[in-house]
Image: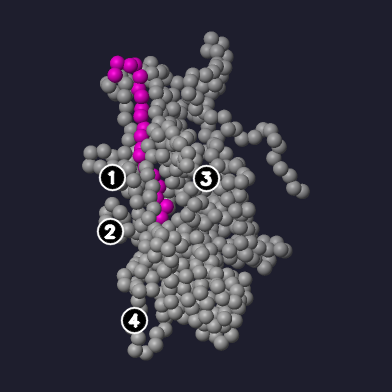
Amino acid sequence: MAGNFAASPTFSLQPSAQQVPLSTNYITNFDFLNQYLPDTYEKEFERYGNRTLSSFIKMVGAEMPSNSDLIKWAEQGRLHIKYTNVTSAAAAGSATATLTVVDSAIGDNPAGTVITGANPYNADAAIAVRVGQTVVVSDNAGGGENKAVVTSVSTGAGGNGVDFDVAYYESAGQVSAGPFTVFIYGSEFEKGTAGMQGSLQSDDYIFENNPIILKDTYLVNGSDMAQIGWIEISTEDGGSGYLWYLKSEHETRLRFDDYLETSMIEAVPAENPAGGPQSGASAAGLIGSEGVFHAVGTRGNLWSGGNPDALADFDSVIDRLDKQGAIEENVIFLNRQFGFDIDDMLAAQNSYGAGGTSYGLFDNDEEMALNLGFTGFRRGYDFYKSDWKYLNDPTMRGGISGTGAINGLLVPAGSTSVYDQVLGKNAKRPYLHVRYRASETEDRRYKTWITGSAGGAATTDIDEMKVNFLSERCVCVMGANNFVLFED
């Protein structure tokens, strides 16, 4: 029988850290004048286990120094030429036609390739089509296709042409009235004619990001530093002892470490209204940064409407990856439910799945605990899955559902070759990596320093120890078209 958890009690989201001294920060239920002493446990019980979240970028990326407020890199465009929204001025059955490219990418500064050099037909065209090239003209509605040769290329206003004439090879002529998808597959010239007119100049995609400054601080007065406690503290970074301020200082450090990663994941650029004055964060002098989710959501692949939980769904993912970089190995970082959905999908492929669990096929036998999970699978590509604590933690993205909720992120494994604008040469970079500000005299990767007059510091006459944390960094998502963001 199906059941569910009661509404109360539930997991606690009450922060253990407070900005001001409150009664909840202190133990008040012990009266040491009482003749009966309580039996106490000295060590804190770690009821939430390891509470830290940072690990994702450490697993899939690297950290590299940068000397600038702006980081730029170039990524390759497509090698071959294809237009998916082409209209024809000719009717079905015509032996020749004038085709017009109306793709949104066509303009004065196209994202693809452009024609340069001596070209009497089109001296500065926005389409990469030249006389003599052979093209496939396919009806977008599935009505058939033609093969044709380009006979002339027009020059439009400002030298930016979008029209070209073709002659069809088939005697039946143009298959329909269009619109069409057109791609170049070769060329053909008569004997004794001149060579190809004009050349194609490669055009890169230029991307950029800027680092943001992250700060935190911890403050304790000198008197409390000398106050012994009856609880032995313990933190995830190995801190221990009976000085309570050490716990708060260690947890501040751990919290800052997590923010260094989650900022790289969640950061967004500060935007202004179109045509309007600065507003919001931008008006406050902040520019923001492009985090992983924002980069993949705007330049990568976005899956929405529920988790892919059937092979047909993953076939759609594979089909999209085929159209991108076709990276052989990929890792899906996901929340718990997405992981279960994949496990159930793979288990269903077993012929014994409907009648009970089979032994042996998945290394299960009678003498061992039954393994109902999978670490990955291969279907065209290798997909490995890894639980992402950030998506499961209820104090962060865990438990968030509905529009825009993130269930997983597919990350390509390995590195890519890009042109580094600062180095001035091609360099190997992980698809996902962090750049931090650093020079010969200043390293802002992870700065920490102590001010005050306690704890070994002697910088002011204030009876306190102030621990400061600072970092300046951004994340570079290279080849975002190879990533997949899975939304709810």
**Which residue matches tag 2?**
425
Mark on residue 389?
A: 3
Q: What residue is disc 4 on?
A: 195
Could you tell me how far apart the alpha carbons at marks 3 and 2 are, in whole angstroms? 37 Å
Question: Between marks 4 and 3, how big is the CA–CA gap?
Answer: 60 Å
Q: What is the x, y in percent for residue 163?
A: 47, 70
* Residues marked 4 and 1 touching at CB (< 8 Å): no
Marks 4 and 1, how far apart in space?
A: 48 Å
Q: Residue at x 52, y 34 (%)?
A: 46
Q: Residue furthest front?
A: 157
Using the image, determine if residue 54 lies above or below residue 467. Answer: below
In the displayed image of the protein, which residue is found farthest to the bottom?
Answer: 191
**Closer to us: mark 2 or mark 4?**
4
| Disc on the earlier residue, 3 or 2 | 3
Magenta-drawn segment: 460-478
- Element under label 1? loop
User: What colouring does the structure picture have?
Assistant: one colour
